[in-house]
Each structure stands twice: as C-alpha cells, then as structure tokens.
Image (cartoon, rainbow, N blue to C red):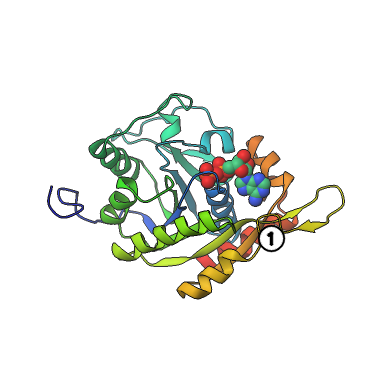
Amino acid sequence: AGAPGAGLPKQAEIPGVGAIIAVASGKGGVGKSTTALNLALGLRALGLKVGLLDADIYGPSVPRLTGIHEKPQLDDSRRMIPIARFGLSIMSIGFLVDEEAPMIWRGPMVMSAITQMLRDVDWGQLDVLVVDMPPGTGDAQLTLAQTVPLKGAVIVSTPQDLALIDARRGLAMFTKVNVPVIGIIENMSYFLCPECGTRSDIFGHGGARHEAERLGVPFLGEIPLHMEIRATSDAGRPVVESEPNGPHATIYRSIAAKVR
Ligand code: ADP
C-alpha cells in the first residue's frame, strides 16, 4: 500500500547506457513491437549503438520478429549477455520463458522482472536503449518510469478512435510519472496495395496526427499498413534490415531522426 511506486528501487542510470526510450501503446495489436524493432534499426542506421529490450512480459514478440530463439549466455559477473543481431543488442523476456506459455504475472513479479531485464543484463556501451513495453498502463510502465531515468516515451497508435482513446490514457499516465512524451506514431496509417500501389485509408488516416496536435505533443510520422512490413516481420527479418533502401526503411529512419 502507500503511494504508487512505494518500495520500488530508486531511479538510477544503467552504467554505459545513454538514453532510454519506451515504446508504448494503449492496447495490443497496433504494431508496437514491429515499430519498436524497426525504430531501433532506424536509430542504428543513423550510426548509433542501439539496444532493444522486449519488456512485453505478457506477450513477448521480439523472438518471432528477429528469429532469435537462443538463451543468453552469462558474463563473468553472471549478468545476461544480450543477443547481437542486425547490429543491435537484443534482450527479451521471451528468450527466458516459453513464448507460447501463457504468463500470469502479479504486481511484484512484474516489477522484479522489469528491474532484472534492465539491471542484470550486460548492456555494454549503448547510445540508446529502446524498450518495447507491454500494452496499456500498468505496473510495468510504472516500474520502468520509476527505476531508470527515461528520455521519454513514444506512443504507437492506429488511426482508429479506440486505439486513440487508449493512446490518450497512456499519454496521461506518462505525464503523471513525469516521463516526457516524445511523440505519437500512427501505424497502419493507410493501406498500400502491394499489387498496384493504390492507397486506401481503411482506418481513417490522420487520426493520430490530429490527436497529437490537439494534445500538443509532436507527431512523429505515419507508417502504412503494408504486406511487406508484416511478411518481413513474420520471417524474422524486419523491413529496415531486409529492405534498407525501400520506402518503409526511409520512413522508420526519418522517425528515428526525430526521436534520437
Ligand atoms: P503489438 O506489439 O502492438 O501487439 P505487433 O507489432 O506484434 O503489435 O503487430 C501485430 C501484427 O500486425 C503483426 O502480425 C505485425 O506483423 C503486423 N503489423 C504491424 N505493423 C504493421 C504494418 N505497418 N503493416 C503491416 N502489418 C503490420
């Protein structure tokens, strides 16, 4: 009981790690993990040393998105060594537990899992650590905000109202715990037909930009709903890595340039 966050470890930097950026969403399925990974690759493409922490304890998807299915080794001080892939240092709770097993976490377990993923990992020297958060606003977000100094949070939303309402809730929560909101990304912003290139605004494109303006937070960019983004993700070769000269990689790099 007591104030929210009572009993949590005090906020402290992770030695060697520069900026820590949380990627959040109000609800699941909006493409938060896909965006987090491609954003991390976009930051890498800008010449930064980048780590990716998949802290989505309820449904870690980084093993699937990266094709990594190995357990991390331990260093001399028994800290986990992140897996090196695509020029990133990657750690996921999914490397440690069965990805398919449903996970039921109680508050204290959430806090200790998040804290361990930040502190008991040998991150080395990083300019940026991108943290893929679980969807929603709960113990994991609170723990992250209160354990390490965050540069800020990036909120991923689709243009649909429901997702936007949830994004708004996320925004309010980060503001409450004094985490700056770096901006909002609209994912699945419009549909680009892979056959003919025709564009359709199936979810009503522009909702997130409008909402960002209304809330006075930066709008970071629009990512189309495109077959290639899904297919490359499912194949474990994210689009910024597999198609570095393609239009999608360009979009993620331009968002990365605003976030860095
Ligand atoms: P979340 O982390 O929000 O639950 P994911 O990143 O796992 O969402 O994405 C959910 C599904 O949508 C995945 O199958 C992913 O490949 C797909 N997806 C995400 N973003 C896009 C996009 N811009 N275009 C096409 N498919 C996408």
The local secondary structure at tag 1 comes to: helix
Q: Residue at x 41, y 35 (%)?
A: 93
Question: What is the residue that sits farthest to the right in this orientation?
Answer: 196
Q: Along the horizontal axis of the image, is 98 left or right of 8?
A: right
- Which residue in the protein does label 1 denote? 250
Horizontal placement of 132 versus 77: left or right? right
| Residue 203 in the image, given as x and y percentages of width and height | 65, 55
Q: In the rendered view, does 31 fall on the left or right side of 132?
A: right
Q: Quadrant of residue 150?
A: bottom left
Looking at the rendering, the quadrant in which ligand 1 lies is top right
The residue lying at 26 percent from left, 52 percent from top is 147
From the Cβ of disc 1, is ligand 1 less than 8 Å away?
A: no
In depth, the one of 92 and 30 nearer the eye is 30
Residue 257 in sight in this render = no
Closest to the observer, 14 or 143: 143
Q: Looking at the image, which residue is at 73% across and 44% down?
A: 227
- Residue 123, image x and y in percent? 39, 46
Mark 1 is surrounded, within 10 Å at the Cα level, by few (under 14), some (14 to 19) or many (20 or more) other residues, namely: some
The one nearer the camera, 39 or 43, is: 39
Name the outermost residue toward the left: 2
Residue 244 x/y as whole percent: 71, 52
Location of residue 64 by image quarter: top right
The amino acid sitting under disc 1 is Thr
